[in-house]
Amino acid sequence: MSEQQNTQIEENKKSLNFIEQIVENDLREGKNNGKIQTRFPPEPNGYLHIGHAKAICIDFGIAQKYGGVCNLRFDDTNPVKEDVEYVDSIMEDIKWLGYEWENVFYASDYFQQLWDFAVQLIKDDKAYIDEQSAEEIAKQKGTPTTPGTNSPYRNRPVEESLSLFEKMNTGEIPEGKMVLRAKIDMASSNMHFRDPIIYRVLHIAHHRTGTTWKAYPMYDFAHGQSDYFEGVTHSLCTLEFVVHRPLYDWFIDELATDDYRPHQYEFNKLQFTYTLLSKRNLRAMVEEGIVSGWDDPRMPTISGLRRRGYTPNSIRILMDRIGYTKFDGINDIELFEFSIREDLNKCATRVSGVIDPIKLVLTNYPEGQTEVMQAVNNPEDETAGSREVAFSRELWIERDDFMEDAPKKYFRLTPGNEVRLKNAYIVKCTGCEKDENGNVTTVYAEYDPQTRSGMPEADRKVKGTIHWVSVPHSIDAEVRLYDRLFLVEDPKGDKDKDFRELLNPDSLIVKTGCKVEAYLKDAKPFDNFQFQRIGYFNVDKDSTDKQLIFNRTVSLKDSWKKQC
Ligand code: ATP
Ligand code: MG
């Protein structure tokens, strides 16, 4: 054990998850001479989502914590859906989450080694070319309780298989006409041992190897071997791979020329309520225009969450909270919303933004006068300081902060009632003006000059405080109010309904003509703010100097609980 590893274990006071326990145990036993190596192995066939972040946090986290190495390996064995765009986005997302890989590898770098290994298996009479169709092969698989049937090609001569395998790669064999299968056991209780397909023909250019290869290895024939080639010690993946593990070990035992073995360990997949996480569904949403792209702020992709205003810290904290277990389950999305609120509460500057503005005129305030008020940037962080905010006779307030006929417990503006204008004066509502349809156009009030900070009645208490933006000092903004994409807790739980039938029609509401304080004119895309009393917002990447655009990251309180 190295000194760093020792210190880490000593310092580790909180309880370990089961993966950390395994790693610490291996270190204590001196396995692999104390070497810890992990990998994050995405297939570059889509953008990363929050589920992948869970894998990233443990793969990179274990290496970081125990002085090991984590590599990024693109599992690019299926050229059909893979693309360089995805490779680039995956790298960007991992870096944004705050992790660094030691090396970048590609499973396609091992195509030659995998080919040679397949040839070795054929020569050892442990693999054969099957010329049956996929349907015929599937029919012969048997069931978990009944054995499968041997393929009529199972005992063909080694030389024949060798020569056909060559042909699978020259382009002579059409797709689907031939596969290479490992010869293991058609009666095994593990279905994955029933002569699994290890190579198939695909006449598609690969994003890195071009048209060099026509025969491509299957995932199970590439993953464990890639781990072995690289020297991975702990190969972490999700629970659906438990049943693949014996095959993972079988291939490595056939391949290994020494005692070293990578080991696969499985943890529970991340699933959230009101969320779909599979890349297949996410891609469909992008291609069908249900969302504006992979980085639509409603998407559970890392790029969508980044654009929505989620912070890397909130995601890492979340993964820590949820933990790693051996049991699948669905986590409440509110846990994620809680994590982002908690993080932004500590770091987001409090500003004034009025989403649905109505004008408030202070009739006893001198026309043309402007005062400068002090606003605390973040009450949770003294070092954040304060800023100056202009105040004048005409202010924008939220439409629902005024009611002409208010119920008893309405503590905002209603004729005869007093409220405090945040960071400024107490004002008393005197009435309103309406248009011909009866809609309120202007609210009137009188301010009390003694109630500003530093004045004799500064501490006078009133029941309500509302936010405001000075009309001549305000800037227009567009505000995009995002909500959950799905109306039901488990969008994939209802087998009779397609996810398209379960979409929330109000997942995006665009508000134009919103008013925000002048301070925000220099805000840059991805900057986070708290619009006081409303929620957390960030600047969208579509925002320009001429048109500020804000995304609602999350409201201040959970509004869904109330509806249920
Ligand atoms: P999807 O099914 O969403 O397309 P995938 O598993 O096919 O995901 P990969 O690119 O193959 O995507 O996954 C890379 C790594 O991320 C794998 O180790 C996989 O186990 C892990 N991973 C994928 N989805 C989740 C999830 N929801 N929770 C935790 N880990 C995940
Ligand atoms: Mg996959």
Image: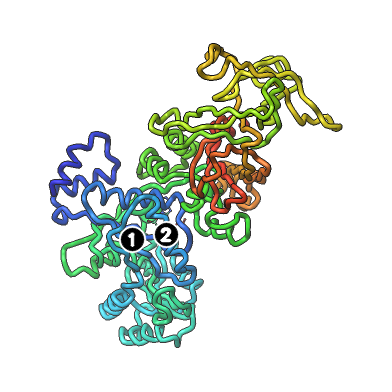
Q: Which mark is residue 455?
A: none
Q: Nearer the viewer, residue 264 or 89?
A: 89
Q: Give the image quarter of residue 435.
A: top right
Where residue 537 sits: x, y (%)?
54, 41
In this view, 307 is above or below 226: above
Count of marks placed on residues: 2
Query: On the rendered structure, is 470 left or right of 33?
Result: right
| Picture residue at 42% right of the left edge, 64% below the top | 87
Q: Nearer the viewer, residue 439 or 421?
A: 421
Q: Give the image quarter of residue 108.
A: bottom left
Judging by the rendered image, the residue that carries numbered circle 1 is 72
**Local SS, label 2:** helix
**Distance from mark 2 CB to nearest ligand 1 atom below 8 Å:** no
Where residue 348 sits: x, y (%)?
46, 37
Where residue 247 sits: x, y (%)?
32, 63
**Distance from mark 1 CB to nearest ligand 1 atom below 8 Å:** no
Q: Which mark is residue 90?
A: 2
Which is more N-terminal, label 1 or label 2? 1
| Picture residue at 38% right of the left edge, 68% below the top | 196
- Quadrant assignment for the C terminus: top right
In this view, 165 is above or below 250: below
Identity, as a three-letter code, of the amino acid under mark 1: Leu
- The CA span between labels 2 and 1 is 10 Å
Q: Nearer the viewer, residue 353 or 8?
A: 353
Identity, as a three-letter code, of the amino acid under mark 2: Ile
Query: On the rendered structure, is 170 left or right of 417?
Result: left
CB contact under 8 Å: marks 2 and 1: yes
Dot 1 crowding, Cα within 10 Å, few <14, some 14–19, many 20+ = many
Q: Name the residue at the right extreme.
A: 436
Where residue 324 sits: x, y (%)?
35, 43
